Image (cartoon, rainbow, N blue to C red):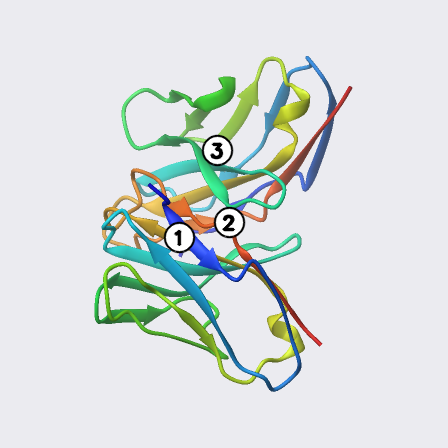
Amino acid sequence: AQSVTQLDSQVPVFEEAPVELRCNYSSSVSVYLFWYVQYPNQGLQLLLKYLSGSTLVKGINGFEAEFNKSQTSFHLRKPSVHISDTAEYFCAVSDAGGGSYIPTFGRGTSLIVHP
Amino acid sequence: NAGVTQTPKFRILKIGQSMTLQCTQDMNHNYMYWYRQDPGMGLKLIYYSVGAGITDKGEVPNGYNVSRSTTEDFPLRLELAAPSQTSVYFCASSYEDRGLGGYTFGSGTRLTVV
């Protein structure tokens, strides 16, 4: 079974600064990768996904992520954050081969943007 | 479109009581899921369904039951509530089996068992 590690439980950052939220997964087999965002008191929304092709994936709200197969990572980045980006971010991975298709979610990273 | 609708949004139960968390989607998605979210623990899959009449256990099914009589509805039943079931519950749906288009989540039900 896949496992997902989000290395930081909380990332504080000042407004307009760049940010990187880290995500590593366990398996070296083909995978699909996702980042979801959860704003306070809401459900999760899909931010971006990697299925195949270009390793640099662009999502909504100016976020992007890079798939690195050799390092089994899928880190999320934004060059300049806003107060409104304060939220919980979840990385998820599912097996692209014959294994379980249901994504495994990481524990989440709380992004806190200070003015 | 309403997407995925969960009711109630909040509930307090006493130990031993039972309740049903409702989940309805209007996107004609075949695949539906129930997750629980505990602080710092991410999401754990409770049950899922690949279509009407078909359900299967996820990672943490004990203490819960589900049914899927229609494509639209996927209720989650707690029979004998325990404090360990205090959590936020999310229902989600997807068009195809791998959620490649992303999951659509409801806004959650916050349950407290006292």
> Which residue carries the number 1 mark?
B92
Where B100 sits versus A62, above or below? below
Q: Nearer the viewer, residue B27 or A70?
A: B27
Q: Mark 2 or 3, which is nearer the eye?
A: 2
Residue at position x 45%, y 75% from top? B77
In this rendering, position of residue B35 left or right of residue B70: right
CA gap between label 2 and label 3 equals: 29 Å
> Is residue B77 depicted above or below A52 in this figure?
below
**In front of the other: B4 or B41:** B4
Chain that bears disc 1: B
Q: Is any atom of residue A64 visible in this view?
A: no
For the residues carrying marks 1 and 3, which lies nearer the camera in this image?
1
Left or right of B59? Residue A108 is right
* Residue in the image at 62% along x and 13% along y: A80
Quadrant for the N terminus of chain A, please. Answer: bottom left
- Can you tell which mark lies on residue A73? 3
Q: Going 43% across and 23% down the picture, which residue do you hit?
A: A59
> Which chain letter goes with mark 3?
A
Residue A76: image location, x then y, percent = 53, 27
- Chain of the residue that carries numbered disc 2 in the rendered image: B
* Number of residues whose C-alpha sits closer than 10 Å to that of mark 2, classed few (under 14), some (14–19) or many (20 or more): many
In the rendered image, the vertical position of residue B37 relative to residue A90, given as above or below: below
Residue A8 in the image, given as x and y percentages of width and height: 66, 38
For the residue labelled by badge 2, is the local secondary structure a helix, a strand or a loop?
loop
Task: Identify residue type, mark 2.
Answer: Ser
Q: Is residue A64 above or below residue A99?
A: above
Secondary structure under the numbered disc 3 in the rendered image: strand
Label 3 crowd (10 A; few <14 / some 14-19 / many >=20)? many
Q: How many numbered marks appear?
A: 3
Q: Type of residue at label 1? A: Ala
Q: Which residue is mark 2?
A: B107
Same subunit: marks 2 and 3: no
